[in-house]
Amino acid sequence: MSASVVRSVSFFVVCSLLACLFAQASLAQLVDPAAESLRSWNDCATKRALVDYVQRVCDPKSSEFVPEPERLAVFDNDGTLWPENPVPFQLAYAFDVVGKRAAKDAEFAKHPMVQAVLKKDIPTLLAGDHHEGLLQVIAMTHAGMSVEEFQKSVSDWVSQATHPKYNKRYDQLTYKPMQEVLRYLRTNGFKTYIVSGGGADFMRVWSERVYGIPPEQVIGSSAKTKFELRDGKPVLIKTLDQLFVDDKAGKPVGIHQAIGRRPIVCFGNSDGDMAMLQYTTIGNPRASFGAIVRHTDEAREYLYDSAPKSSGKLVEALADAPKQGWHVIDMKQDWAKVFDE
Amino acid sequence: MSASVVRSVSFFVVCSLLACLFAQASLAQLVDPAAESLRSWNDCATKRALVDYVQRVCDPKSSEFVPEPERLAVFDNDGTLWPENPVPFQLAYAFDVVGKRAAKDAEFAKHPMVQAVLKKDIPTLLAGDHHEGLLQVIAMTHAGMSVEEFQKSVSDWVSQATHPKYNKRYDQLTYKPMQEVLRYLRTNGFKTYIVSGGGADFMRVWSERVYGIPPEQVIGSSAKTKFELRDGKPVLIKTLDQLFVDDKAGKPVGIHQAIGRRPIVCFGNSDGDMAMLQYTTIGNPRASFGAIVRHTDEAREYLYDSAPKSSGKLVEALADAPKQGWHVIDMKQDWAKVFDE
């Protein structure tokens, strides 16, 4: 090899190394990764507070530094990561299943809650502290199936059902700014969890594909399955035994059951999320961050807070937000985009 | 810069790059990482089968390749990762707590199960399909406390109580070969879980420090906590509501509840682990691996299988092992070391 060839090759190698080093330095110092990550957010107080918080807990030199295994962030799903109107999307699934079965089964069609579904009588279904009518419908449509049968039913539904307002598949309606928050936190070493009143088995079918959240990080309402051997093969059958409603005071209970540690970041959107906001932020030895998504955007999404029929009532948590330091996200003001277009 | 300096620098850079590439190649091809990792194992059929299995499911070119998020390995704890004699270690904890309380509280001391504890009447405590007497003792010593109080009580006990045979702290008695399996699997992209009949809250106090398994990967027996605000601060109180016994057919149920996906690797040591061995290995679309630790070493550990008083009865699973392809680990023959000395 001639000296000039060696020189050319080595010049190329040295340049490549320098380019690599420079690129790393740029990433760390010159680009603002938060601004890049959270580009569907307008420049608002909540965005600035979140970036400031993440920098503080991720900086090993900060007095508020949190080791990575304790960086746990919990998110409500309905109304926080995707809409919950005109009904929570799992209810839309149950309605479709009930409708199909009622058309074939006259006895089934007589049940008062099946009647409520057929008449789209939402107040009856959502009545009660934990929406007991809704739970009965879910029970009728979910229990007795094997886990695999249920997963297939949900998967088939998600792949074809569309939302009445947007005429898009439900899984295409996640909030873009919240998807950015999920990714931004994960990039900074957080483990992201869904903590929802919805069924764990319902969400786990698509949570990894849609949110990048694997099934083991989905906490939801659930009942015990029953283990059986059928023709020598193991099957788990969905039942209603030990029904657990992961809502209100149930949310911290579900978090403790699944994780065994307190989260440090919590996003919710209704009074149903108040207990987990309290559990995350009040008296936590770690620096914490709580936020509430407020539905203020009638044009792009929905406008509601305390509407009596709403499944996402937000009165107490909103009143307590200033005292507890919970950040309130005004969807209309704070989000440059709501959905991915 | 003279041409010779450039040449020297570039020669150094090129050599460094080659050295790096060579080092990587060595790690991958020349050193046998499994032999290094599993050095407390003798060269036995189970060790060879495990290494062969891990290579197959981790090789992207293999037809049996399993993507990393699905590499889930579940381990029973008592008798599989540490001993369960003369009594399961959580029972030793409960005995100590009961003894201290009985000495101060005459009414408490009259309870038949407290009497059984004081007389060390193990058969009475372990009677019943799920050791109901033991559960009563656990209830009396665990329920009504806050999660933090319970954690402190367990942590204090673990830091000072010692095992009667070994005169060592209980947390120093984990099986060295099994610790190596945990690390070997994690090095190969597996997520390791404990799935134990023991209490989740009991194990989570020390699982991360002792096994490198974080609390959210500990599945155990549990009951619902109760969320309260005390002086405005959130507290979770341990109760006996919705008691769930993570044993026998409860193990696959607990796995589905916590993970929502089938594991592909399972280690157990008794008939209590048979259902989760079945769930892991029978009809699993993924290549799977099941193994049973057999207590054959009277000198270094204990000798038992089907002893009628044993809490780790191993009869049915052992009989089914050849048919199901479950690997049986003979502690005396297969383990060069049992404990870390």
Image (cartoon, coloured by chain):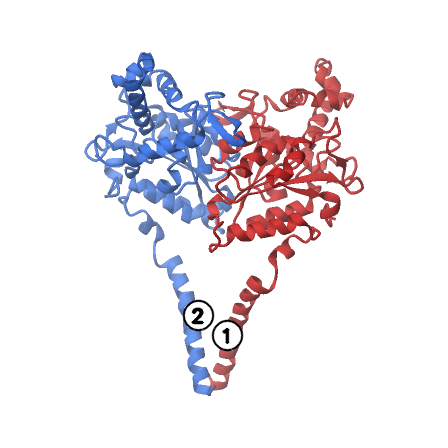
Chain colours: A red, B blue
Quadrant of residue A79 within the rendered picture: top right
Residue under numbered circle 2:
B17
Residue furthest toward the bottom?
B2
Percent from the top left, x then y, of residue B62? 48, 49
Camera-nearest residue between B194 and B223: B223
Depicted A326 relative to depicted B34: above or below = above
Q: Which residue is mark 1?
A: A13
Mark 2, Cα crowd under 10 Å, few <14 / some 14-19 / many 20+, is: few
Q: Amino acid at mark 1?
A: Val
Q: Nearer the viewer, residue A67 or B249?
A: A67
Residue A323 found in image quarter: top right
The CA distance from mark 1 to mark 2 is: 10 Å
Q: Indicate left or right for A326 with B230 as reference.
A: right
Residue B132 lies left or right of residue A151; in this view the side is left
| Picture residue at 34% right of the left edge, 26% below the top | B319
The amino acid type, in three-letter code, at marker 2 is: Leu
* Callout 2: SS: helix
Circles 1, 2 touching at the beta carbon (< 8 Å): yes
Front-lying residue, B336 or A293: A293
Q: Is residue B17 above or below residue B287?
A: below
Residue B259 in picture, x, y percent from top left: 51, 35
Q: Is residue A212 left or right of residue B55?
A: right
